[in-house]
Structures are given as C-alpha cells and as structure tokens.
Image (cartoon, rainbow, N blue to C red):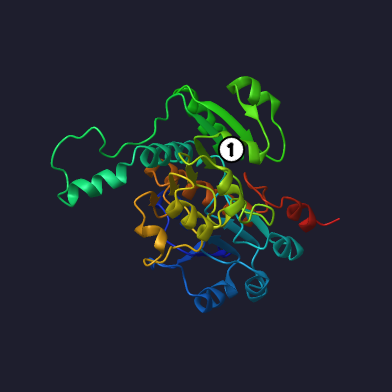
Amino acid sequence: MEALPRVYVTRLIPRAGMDLLRGCAQVKVWEGELPPPREVLMAEVRAAEGLLSLLTDQIDAELMDAAAQLRVISNYAIGYDNIDVPAATERGIMVCHTPGILTDTTADFAFTLLACVGRRVVEAVRYVREGKWKTWGPMLCLGHDLYGATLGLIGLGRIGSAVAKRASGFQMRVLYYDVERIPALENELGLVYTDLDSLLEHSDFVSLHTPLTAETYHLIGAPQLKLMKKTAILVNTSRGAVIDEQALYEALVSGEIAGAGLDVTDPEPIDADDPLLQLDNCVVVPHIASASVAARTLMATLAAENLVAGLQGRMPRNPVNPEVLDLRRPR
C-alpha cells in the first residue's frame, strides 16, 4: 500500500479542514498560538510534500529549497503576499489560496468599521466604562451619518463590489478607483469611476480593498491624507502596508481627517505602545474581518481541498500558478 503524502500545517485550523487532511495525508501540526519560529518551520518542511500555511508565514526561496519534496503550498488566506510565487513556480511548486469565501464576511466587517468609527462607538463604550457618563447631552460623542454620505472605494474586486452593494441600502453615493474601469458594475450598482485624488477629495468615507503590491505600498500617505475632508473616515481591511501609518497618525492628531478604522496594520501585530492605539479617533482590531465561524470553516475546507488536489496531481479550485501542473506533465 502506497504511503500517504506528508503534510505540515502551520497552525490549528477549524476541524472540518483538519479532518479532510487527516483522511488523505500524514499530518503534522504546529499547535502554538504564535506562528512557528523560522528554524522550526525550516526543519519541519524538509520531509513535507504539502504545506498549509497562513499569511503570517514567510514562504521564500530558502524555505522551498529546504523542503526538497514540497509540491503544494496551500495558503489559508485570500492574499498570498507572504509567498514568493515566482520562486515556487520556478521549483514546480503549486501555490493555492482561498478567495471568494471571505467576500461577504469581510464586506460586512468593512461596513462595521465604517459605522463604528463614524459613530464613535468604541470611544462611547470607553466613556461609559470609565464612569464619565453623567447625563444625556446634545454634544456628546457626535459622529457622522452613513446614510446619504459619499463612499469612496479603492479597489473594486470581490470585496469592494460587495461593500458597494451594501452601500446601496444606506443610499450612499459610491465612487471607486481601480487600475481598470468596470463598466458592468458601474451600471449595475450606480457607481462613479474617478481618479484617486478626486475620490479622496470628495468622499466622506474611504474604504481600502486593494492587494498589497509594489504599486500599492503606502498608497495612502501624507499627500493623499491631506486631500481628504477633515470630516472623512478611512477604513482598511486589505493589508496594513497600503497605508503609511506614521502619516496616518499625524493626520489623525492634527485633525486632517476625523477618524480611521484598521483591521490590518504594518507590522502585525501592532505594538502595544504604538501611538495609534492612544487615539480616541482610531479603532484598531486584530485582523478579524473574516472571523466568522462560517467563513473560517469554509476557508479551512477549501485550503485542505486545494492541498489534497495538488498532491493528487489534480488542478485545485484556486491555484495561483496553474501553469505548474502543465510543467509537471510528461511531454
């Protein structure tokens, strides 16, 4: 009987995914709360044919070379900027990810942050807990309405589009900026395409939905923040490094913008002493936009299915570099 392929999983994932893997492979799991240390990961992948990684794991050429038998990397995330995809392709290693599943959950959370920061919810909760609430007051914790406001979306992929659909229920005017226009969605959702500067100038709320690339690194810095309204709210559920956080801090302190909501930071986790955490007008949460039971379970299942398919020589549902499978086939 042929031995089952060896798989290393860099963190415990929901049971549905683990059960699927254990039915098809020899599985070893790093069970710590924090990511496996680099030296542990390097040692554990040496005998692995499959790797199920998280966005917190840096999968580079050095690690791939240490993993001489590695054939598939399945990332438990929609993004894969933690993986050197060209290096994987060069070595004939399939890379997969988990798109689509997170769309609605993340869009819901982007709207949660928009409302939370706009209406100063966290600040108000703190106000009550600190015993400062003495009476109802007409000027207490005044915030900004979502209904009828202008929402600017930077990036109109799956998640950005889902946020635009939710905005229609609030009768929001929606502007968007992307590297390409998408006329079909403009017509369907009543969106207005504009350049980045114009979007920043005219939006009451700005929500980021762009991948992290060389072009989007610090896409929002001091010049861009100066363009925004003093009453504007900035929300980021994409990747932390899309924003220059030092510039954001200065803009929040000086009143250049009214507030910010960050699901992601640069680096992650954010340092407990980071000055952003001292600001009442900045809400920071620990990368939980996809953290619903349903979404995380589906992610686990899809990541496991992708890994098993790649190990069995089949095309996974969500390959990043599908050409690898063709390269493997004998000619």
Residue 141 relative to residue 259: left or right: left
Give, as a three-letter code, the residue at label 1: Glu
Give the residue drawn at x 58%, y 69%.
Answer: 48
Looking at the image, the residue that sits furthest to the right is: 331
Give the residue drawn at x 46%, y 57%.
Answer: 22
Q: Position of residue 306 (x, y in %)?
A: 58, 50
Where does the N terminus fall, quadrant-wise? Answer: bottom right
Q: Nearer the viewer, residue 75 or 218?
A: 218
Q: Nearer the viewer, residue 214 or 108?
A: 214
Where does the C terminus fall, quadrant-wise? Answer: bottom right
Q: Secondary structure at mark 1?
A: helix
Give the residue drawn at x 60%, y 46%.
Answer: 210
Q: Position of residue 296 (x, y in %)?
A: 43, 47
Q: Nearer the viewer, residue 52 or 167?
A: 167
Q: Say which residue label 1 marks.
A: 201
Total label count?
1
Q: Nearer the viewer, residue 15 or 34?
A: 34
